Amino acid sequence: MSVVFIALPIALLLAGLAVWGFIWSVKQGQYDDLETPAVRMLQDDDPPHNKPHSS
Amino acid sequence: MSTAQTKAMSFSNQVACTHCGQPVPGHLVRKEYDEQFCCHGCETAYRIVQEDQDLFDSIQQRRSENDASLFSGHDYGFLDHESFQEANCQPIGDGLVRTKFLLGGVVCASCVFAIEKLPRFLPGVVSARMNLTSSTATIDWQPDAIALSEVARTLDRLGYPPHPVVEDELEALQRQESRRQLIRLAVAGACAGNTMLIAVALYFGLFTGMDSEFFHLFRWTSAGLAMVCLVWPGRVFFHGAWQAVRAGVPHMDLPVALGLAAGATMGFVNTILQRGEIYFDSLTVLVFLLLVGRYLQYVQQRRAIQQISLLRSMLPRSVTRLLETNVNAATECVPLEAIRVSDWIHVRAGDVIPVDGIVMHGSSLIDQAILTGESNGIPTTTGDRVLSGATNLAGPIIVQAQSIGAQTRLGQIAELVEEGVRGKAPIVQFANRIGGYFVAIVLTLAAITIVCWAPFGIEAAINHAMALLIVACPCALGLATPLTVAIAQGRAGAKGILVKSGDVFEYLARPGVIWLDKTGTLTEGRMHLIEFFGDTTVAPAIEALERQIVHPIAEALVRDLAVPADERISATRVTDVETLPGIGVQGWIDGERISVGSSQMIAEANLFIGESLEHRLAVLIEAGDTAVVIARQSEVAAVCSLGDRVRIDAKQTIASLEEQGWTVGILSGDHQQAALRIGQAIGIAPQRILGGLSPEDKLRQIQKSNPSQTVVMVGDGVNDSAALAAASVGIAVKGGAEVSLKAASVYLNRPGTLPILEIITGSRKTVRAIRRSFAVSLGYNGIAVLLSMCGLINPIVAAILMPISSLSVLAISASSGAFRQRLTKEQPVNLQVQKVVS
């Protein structure tokens, strides 16, 4: 019995996990729009609240 | 400054400045606020950066001041109407409602920024998400806190006129399809990659030797991966082949399915019997590559269709309805769907008439070019019938709706479009025809192989035949068409030629018959000043007077007289402007009466006209254009003619088309005389100039033509749409009507007729590139088949031949010159008056 008998199924399992992750992300709609997220990162975060403390 | 101050101050506490991060002096700390500043400079800088509210306001203000054209100024009141909200707003819980808008004018990151910041300025809007690819914004809002019309108006003021979109079933289906294709691609890719890794181990094992336990482990694993690949993503090929067999038409999927089936059978049998070759690496890569080609084509196609549907949605959907059937009744803005028969509708000048009906009040000029092809506006007054889709050019009118939706003339034409589509015979693509022959030849060769090798034992014969079927599998052949078409579509799209389907290129590659619409296609579709005789010093006065009114003639005169800014007469000096319905307009400028109108005005206003001008006027009327008389006080000072102008590039386009072997003709809805005049001016033979055609006539003319010949229809109007749908290739030109965009398979998003030449040349190059790829890949397949017939093929040879042939196809597709460079240099367009004779 060689380590290959363990390594090969593990390798396939990992590949399967990656495919599953991809399918999940496609179903989430993450590939529906490939342009907007790329420009969204140029936006500033929301500034801290400009209001008096509630305390 | 902040440094100096902080140095001087003692650090009584350790509050950091929100802007620069330095300690804030004690007396400046404001305990009740989150933000702390060490100085005014920091505070000002911080406010400039952070106070989007001001920025936002100033953008709005600048837009509405300087860029009136961007600001459509629609009243979005109809969005608040019940019937609209029921159909377009989707409740998502928590008292929130989701609405999707298609936005015009969204181009870049800043637009996304401006739109997604909406929730900060509009209380009641919870979130705004922009999708750049489809130009849609998804807005979640609280109906209790804000009206939808307010959201729409804000978007409009920002320069993004919103159009409500209903996600119809088709769109949802398309999105599903796109996702499914991606998933298939991923699974096929993963299977192919892993099978190849295992194959590498197996190939090394061939040379260096390998324990049989590992050998079989690897083979069984490959078999498992190939199984997954064939039954999940690979299923599409078997499905396609089965459909082709059932329908009895050749298809590229046939040889692919045959090769896959042969390879899989042989591979599995050999795996189980623990002998011979397995071809799983080649098979899985084949499936993956073919899916990549298809996916690319699908993406390009979808992009073109999306861009076209964006253009289509840019049409008005709201209607101003009178609350009572009374001319002076109050009005409300409602969605088009809410209109019922016998409602009274207010149509502003410049608006599209939404229903078929009768004019109840007011008089105007109606442009029906889009429905009939007639280039001149039709004077319309109380009691006249107007058709939906026509444009109200001059004054406001009130229309009583007689038929709505599908019952209107527009609706009937839309039905005619369906008829046109049904009557259209689909083209069997070159690739699919080849695919048919291919299967026949390969099967024959396989049979010959069996017969020839039979004397050496039946097992060897079957092995060789199977090897032949596998290596003959036309991977490159299947890749060539989608890949080349996808590249051509992408490049054409970047040049403003949107191609909806791939078979367009094949149709346009060979010359056939091309029918062109006249108004709006060969001509510019709007009034132009053609000739001007008489006193030119009156021009500034005419310009000032015509600026006061809304009328196509007035617009043409203002545009084409092109009075320099320093000679212009200010509007305040123009007084007592009075329109004389059906005749013209008059007004006073500095105590002088200026009147502009038809020749009828001479008799009506008792004007004096000089002999030479009278002669000129007679000539102009004879020529068939609209003649206009200009009078100062009670004497005619000038006469001019206005008409539709032939596009500058039309003549050149027609000439090159005929040079390339196309038969060019005109199908016009305008009068035969008008069609003849334009057609002959650009060099079209009179027997192929057909005028006075109804939409049905145009459709019949297209259907009458020889089915084996390519028939191209180029048009823009509703009246062309049935013909556009029935033609082998329908080309809609810029500014086309909604129905024509839907019916045509190509949309030219650039004015002029030169893009027609471009797509024809591009198609020829595309088809040539496809054939080149075919020749190359058939060459490879031929070699492989020969080798296998001689029994010389082994998996290594197959594994090397296949990627080489695919790579050469890739290289050929990418290097095809289709839509690469401009056909001709763009000519400067002369916008000045062509001839001004004094």
Image (cartoon, grey):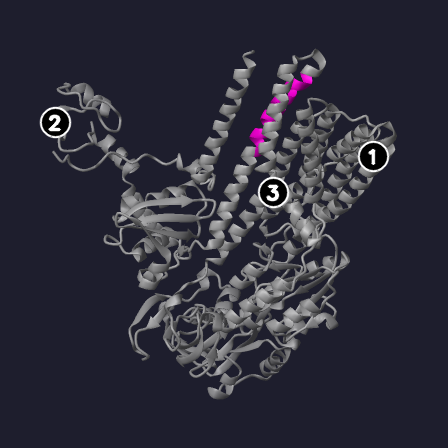
Q: For the residues carrying marks 2 and 3, which lies nearer the camera in this image?
A: 3
User: Label 1: which residue?
Assistant: B450
Q: Mark 1, residues whose alpha carbon is within 10 Å: few (<14), some, or many (≥20)? A: many
The location of residue B507, given as percent across then percent down, is: 70, 54
First in sequence: mark 3 vs mark 1: 3
> Which quadrant of the figure has residue B148?
bottom left
User: Label 3: which residue?
Assistant: B236
> Magenta span has B598?
no
- Lateral position of residue B703 relative to residue B148, left or right: right
Q: Residue at x 42, y 49 (%)?
A: B136
Q: Chain of mark 2?
A: B
Q: Mark 3, residues whose alpha carbon is within 10 Å: few (<14), some, or many (≥20)? A: some
Q: CA distance from mark 2 to mark 3?
A: 75 Å
SS for callout 3: helix
Q: For the residues carrying marks 3 and 1, which lies nearer the camera in this image?
A: 1
SS for callout 1: helix
Q: Mark 2, residues whose alpha carbon is within 10 Å: few (<14), some, or many (≥20)? A: few
Q: Chain of mark 1?
A: B
First in sequence: mark 2 vs mark 3: 2
Is residue B661 positioned above or below B775 on the image?
Answer: below
Q: In the rendered view of the protein, which quadrant contains the N terminus of chain B? A: top left
User: Label 2: which residue?
Assistant: B27
Q: Which residues are magenta?
A: B188-204
